[in-house]
Image (tube, grey):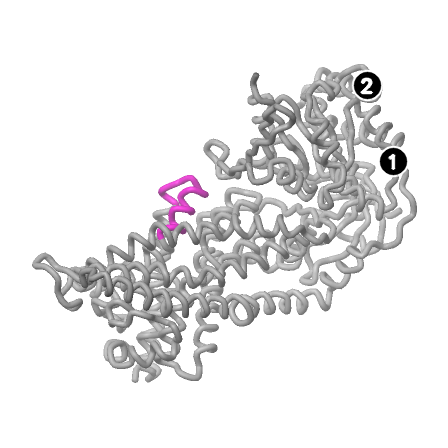
Amino acid sequence: MITLKDAKPGQTVLVDSVKVTGQARGRFMAMGIMKGTRLKVIKVAPLGDPIEVLVRSYNLSFRKAEAEQIIVSLV
Amino acid sequence: MSALTVALAGNPNTGKSTIFNFLTGARQHIGNWPGVTVDKKMGQMTKGNKQINIIDLPGTYSLSAYSLEEKIVKDFLLEEKPDMVVNVVDASNIERNLYLTVQLLEMGIPTVVNLNMMDEAGEKGYNINLEALGKNLGVKVISSVATSKNGLNQLVDSLDPSLTRLAGAADSKLLAEHLKAIENIKKSENNSEIADEKVIEARYEFINKVLEKSLVINEAKESWSDKLDNLLTNRVLGIPIFLSIMYVMFQATFAWVGQPLSDILDGFIGGTLTDWVSGGMESLGTAGWLQSLVVDGIIGGVGGVLVFVPLIFTLFLLISFLDGTGYMARVAFIMDRAMRRIGLSGKAFLPMLIGFGCSVPAIMGARALDTERDRRIAVLIAPFMSCGARLPVYALFAALFFPGRESAVVLSLYILGIIIAIIMGLIFKSTYFKGDAEPFLMELPPYRIPTLKTVLLQTWEKGKGFLVKAGTIIFSMSVLIWFLSSYNFSGPVDIADSLLATIGGVIAPLFTLHGFGTWQSGVAVLTGILAKEAVVATLGVIYGISELAEDAAQAATQLQGSIGATFTGLSAYAFMVFTLLYTPCMAALGTIKKELNSWKWALFAAGYTFLVAWIVSLLIYRVGLLLGLGG
């Protein structure tokens, strides 16, 4: 089992489940990240965090702390 | 006949403001949503013989009340019931943008979808069939490129609720199915959290079904925006480029454009205007006290503030431009990790940067932060960013006591301000504001070239507070200081015997240990709370130079005898440090009260900064003495 945090820039993954909790969970889902969503890791910020992903054809950034709670499988 | 009310709703970065500006022109005003400090933009337009009121709702990604803005939009739509909504959608980011659209349709408000940024969608290889999209969504869909005004006349034609099809109309089979589906979820699922999630999933399913029938994506080559971004946020080059951009911005403000313009304005106000007014009043035989009031008090005081206007507006112009290009989102992306150390997110960097211009828009800029906690911390530490109004104090003292090393001394103060902000951020983070920060979730929009109109409007919105302050607080302050410095209860007197000297003398003992416990400093500190610019203006009045800072070095020569007798190099530095850190000006405190909606926090901000300034300045003076720098 890998998480989005383990995915390298350039890799495309499929979301298996979102383990983010609380109100943030709803925000992630409203932004389009949910089970079955295809994500592409674009890059990691120069200081090592946050990351940038391509989701539903737009670019979104969030921290590794949350990326670690998104379970994915490589495509 | 009652006027039509139209609300503009849409995600951030969709060009909604450009459309609002086009529709309303200059006929707009900005108010506040009740009880909160989110801007409420309203405007009017005339169509035929009809009056249309337009409300530009805050940009939101959804109507789920995840943020203050979302709650405002939702409440407005539910309670005020506008006649119709124009939903501005970024066509190049249609899938996520339609999420809000679906929520609007679920609410059953008459809606027109305006697909904006069709040019970018085209570049991205998107081929959108408007008719199919409208048919499957069950609403009227029109398209535009707002930056070049394409399609906006068609939008004006569509501002008619009878032309929108009511959401839920049987026109769209897919919509009818979706509405039924979410009704079933709500009925069958008892756990509201799980129900909410299922509804979110159902909305994206609906969107995907609609797009299957209306969107064809052709292969597109890598966009210039992506290429540019690979450079600007490059792992290795990202930070050097960021620092270079900041450097250029500050050079432009303080060396190339802003400062020279300020110098020209200063030359005019302090020279030509002063001579002209005093000459004119002389020839009219005006009483000496009135001449003194107008020339020394008002022109000296208000003029002393006005000369910073070019400086501040240059900085705000550059920041507004960078903001419009999308680079500021990258700054937040690059700086997030560093900002998190002090308990803030990367989004707090921009307000801190604005703080170097003026604390008032910096404090207002903290609105962009996601949580109440972040907003409070940012608002409390933003005043430590050395604002433009404090610069003349450093310029004067540095020229006087540290000739040849002015730049290094001034720079050291800016850096000290940043360090104190970081320390206080750390303290707040680990004490009162303990707890987990809200996750950082930020869209990185494509790079765009903002329109001149948008940049200028934003610059004006950020900078106008400073002008208002010059016309109100500074004006009355100047008159008051002039009066207090020229009179006591027995009549006109020399400044050393004036009321001002008496008041300053009461405060002075607070600073005996700091090496500047004189009535002159006391008065300057007091007036500085009303406006930081007044510190130097007050010293000018006290030490008797009417045209301050026409040239800092020249003023320094004039002041050599007078100030040199009351300050040493070390105590002058301690005084500069105190000026940097102590209580924000009245305008900033008023803004803090407004933004945090609490007198308690405003008073706390006033008190703790004074204490910090008192301690740090004392430490610097005492340690300096121990190191033998007191000479």
Q: Is residue A6 visible?
A: yes
Q: Is residue B236 above or below residue B30?
A: below
User: Residue at 44% of width from left, 60% of height from top?
Assistant: B384
Which residues make up the magenta segment?
Answer: B586-601
Q: Nearer the viewer, residue B539 or A60?
A: B539
- Secondary structure found at label 1: strand
Residue identified by numbered label 2: B177
> Residue B215 has which mark?
1
Q: Find residue B100 and report its image quarter.
A: top right
User: Residue at 40% of width from left, 68% of height from top?
Assistant: B392
Q: Nearer the viewer, residue A47 or B117?
A: B117
Q: Position of residue A21 (x, y in %)?
A: 66, 38
Most extreme residue toward the front is: B283
Q: Position of residue B549 (x, y in %)?
A: 37, 72
User: Residue at 54% of width from left, 61% of height from top?
Assistant: B314
Left or right, residue B358 beside residue B12: left
- Of circles 1 and 2, the one toward us is 1
Q: Amino acid at mark 2?
A: Glu
Q: Nearer the viewer, residue B85 or B268?
A: B268
Chain of the residue displaying label 1? B
Q: Is residue B271 above or below residue B404?
A: above
Whether residue B588 appears in magenta in the rendering, the answer is yes
Could you classify mark 2 by the number of other residues whose Cα lies within 10 Å: few (under 14), some (14-19), or many (20 or more)?
A: some
User: Residue at 44% of width from left, 57% of height from top?
Assistant: B383
